[in-house]
Image: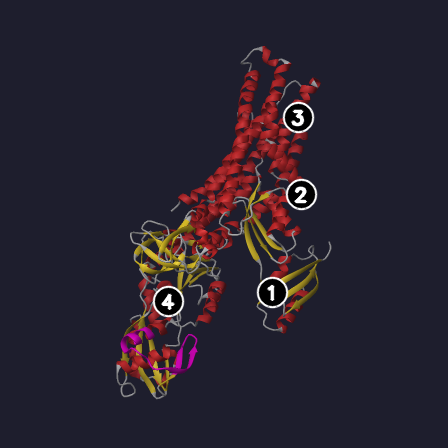
Amino acid sequence: MAQRQVQIPVTGMTCANCAANIERGLKKLDGVSGASVNFASERAGVAFDPAAIPLEAILEKIEKLGYGVATQKVDLPITGMTCANCAANIERTLNKKVEGVVSASVNFASERASVEFIPSQASLAEIAAAIEKAGFGVILPDAEGEAEVDAEQAARDAEIRDQTRKFIVGLIFALPLFVWSMARDFALIGMWSHAAWVNWIFFAMATPVQFYTGWDYYAGGYKSLRNRTANMDVLVAMGSSVAYFYSVAVLLFPAVGDHVYFETSAVIITLIKLGKMLEARTKGKTGGAIRKLMGLRPKTATLIVDGAEKTVPLTEVKKDDIVLVRPGERIPVDGVVISGGSTVDESMLTGEPIPVDKSEGDAVVGGTINGEGVLRFKATRVGRDTALAQIIRLVQEAQGSKAPIQALADRVAAVFVPAVILIAVIVFFIWWIATGAFVPAMIRLVAVLVIACPCALGLATPTAIMAGTGKGAEKGILFKNSTALETATHLSTIALDKTGTITEGRPEVVDRIWYPPRCESETELMRLAGAVESGSEHPLGRAILAEAKATVGDLPDATLFKAERGLGVTAEVLGRRIRVGKPRWFDADALEPSVKEEIAARQAEGKTVMVVMADDGPLGLISVSDVVKPDSKEAIEGLHRLGLKVVMITGDNERAAGAIAASVGIDEVVAEVRPEDKAEKVKALQKGGAKVGMVGDGINDAPALAQADVGFAIGTGADVAIETGDVILSSGSLAGIPRAIGLSRATMRTIRQNLFWAFFYNSLLIPVAAGALYPFEALPVFLRQLHPILAALAMAFSSISVVGNSLRLYRGR
């Protein structure tokens, strides 16, 4: 294959050495013939052989070297797919034929293509053209992105209407044809029905079914074969065509045979069209969560412009606009309340049914419902930046991703149709040779072709993933991808951060003690400690600062501020060097025995003790305490019921951590861990054989969340764009963890049931259609000689059963 040149925009380079580093790394890759990285333009020009190395591997190498690649991701609705092989065909087309596409994943169940591409190398128009050339339709979002939902839904509805129309036409012709044909075969009507003209009427009734109702199967089969693959359409087109064209041959050349099978071909196509129509309707329900989320967006918003109210379309709301929300209305965009007071139903965001009080200064989220009061707020995030838009995007990405368990089904689906065609041909010749009769052998051939169902295999995993992630979104649980959903089922240990996870994360000063003559009063202690902490961003430091301002008022200036991560802070205040930090930061000899005893006594009560130290000795102790969240104990009990071990990893001292742990039922405490060392503690648990889920705030705990097998990031309301973490709990509640793990287990259980059914169905019924039960005379005739019409009926409802089983996840608790 010819060499390809690609220009890759690179981020994160800080000097020419960075560019040289990337160049060296890329040139080591097999298949890369040249690489030139320009630090000034921040681009990497790479010449490579696509047959030897995919573009995705080149980008992975750049990221592995520690740099980023500026790619764009887009989620495109696809129309015209009829089975999992269609999805695989589009994936191959985009990955191999569109220059600049990094990766493409097509989900047959949700009918969406998730495409990552380099904007400077590929455009949406080029991607759409490639999909259409492969024989499918694609719906591109408009510039605003708002019409995408309506356009997609309209296309889906049009497709269902088309399927319904074709089914009705098929039913109008196939039902009387079937009844008339069976009445003739069972001698229920006179000999006139055996006249030659009756067969011509049968031909006239079967032909519209074959070439109007069944046209999709011919068109789909042609597209599939043109792309050197074979899908379900090929099987249906072949099976029905054998029966139809054999009957045409009997009609034109009576010497060929004495019986036509027009009713067989017509009923096969009509039944399978019924199955596809019901499947399309049922499959649409698995994506109901996204439509429900999209339906939360109001169409209009009321703005306050020059003191007057003005109703505008939602797309016209801009950042910093003043928005008015009346009782019972949906809040249109994210913002901060500037006047008024009310309660807001945030259940769509958090899964919690209790309304939240809102007043001046509080954040509100688009899509939530205002209660009994009137609110005025300033818009802070609009359009695609709102929390609701981010939630929708996260759910779409999770639903479009493939779980590892799907790999087996994908491998089987890739060879399934050719294998079935081969089996059908072998069965035909075996029966023809064994019986010497062409027609019974042909009936077996048609039955095998028609009964095989690759759709059930293709739908088994993605429909369950869609239902599981959709159910999670309703409960404030956002899975970033289906791999996280699958991995969560295998967890054995849950590691929790303390502050903000088990506790509220809002520590308060609960007591203080000072030591004369170095410190003469509580006021002096808080003035010095507050001044030092004025430069700190740590929650404990902010608690001390807030208490100092409340106690003392104005604070003196602090200079030469320095923070020791995980230990404390130092600054110069009023000419004295003051340190405020954890007891272990200080030399043991610097603390008198009486001071150590007081520290130990407070730590035993679950308090965090901060020592205020001057050069000449300790000035005093400030005890800070954080309140345990009301649902933490219940959540940890829920984790225990799921058979999980719960470990707390905290920077707090052992006594204080132990007191908190005992109050909520933690199994193991790992205390006095610096933030940067939490990832190492997670790694140590993994080395002990545990599958670890780490729960943290997604910012301070980012390395530990990344190290864990599954990272659970606890958001707070609108904060759903957390980069680290595989699962985001938008409710901010620890109760979401047992819910998330329970949901992942239920989803994987459903996937295993679906896969078992799909494999069991095909493994059992293909041999039955082939005549494996023919020697057993005690069995009913319809099983020993399975008619193609029964085969079509079984095939039509096999995929519906899989989708229906997945939908049960929505009804689960």
User: For the view shown, which residue lies furthest in the right direction?
Assistant: 2
| Camera-side mark, 2 or 1 | 1
Q: Which of the marked residues, 1 or 4, is nearer the chain's N terminus? A: 1
> Is residue 793 in view from this perspective?
no
Magenta-drawn stretch contains 557: yes
Q: Secondary structure at mark 1?
A: strand
Q: Is residue 658 shown left or right of residue 132?
A: left
Q: How far apart, in angstroms, are the residues tagged by discs 3 and 2?
A: 26 Å
Mark 2 sits on what residue? 227
Q: Which of the marked residues, 3 or 1, is nearer the chain's N terminus? A: 1
Label 3, residues with CA under 10 Å away: few <14, some 14-19, many ≥20: some
Contact, mark 1 vs mark 4 (Cβ under 8 Å):
no
Question: Disc 3 marks which amino acid?
Answer: Phe
Magenta-drawn stretch contains 288: no
Residue drawn 51% across the image and 54% down it:
483
Mark 3 sits on what residue? 245
Q: Which residues are magenta?
A: 545-571
Mark 4 sits on what residue? 499
Q: How far apart, in angstroms, are the residues tagged by discs 3 and 1?
A: 59 Å
Q: How far apart, in angstroms, are the residues tagged by discs 4 and 3?
A: 74 Å
Q: Nearer the viewer, residue 496 or 326?
A: 326
Image coords of residue 734 (percent x, y): 37, 59
Q: Which of the marked residues, 2 or 4, is nearer the chain's N terminus? A: 2
Q: Is residue 734 shown left or right of residue 791?
A: left
Label 1, residues with CA under 10 Å away: few <14, some 14-19, many ≥20: many
Contact, mark 3 vs mark 2 (Cβ under 8 Å):
no
> Is residue 73 in view from this perspective?
yes
Question: Disc 2 marks which amino acid?
Answer: Asn
Mark sitting on residue 10 = 1
Q: Secondary structure at mark 2?
A: loop
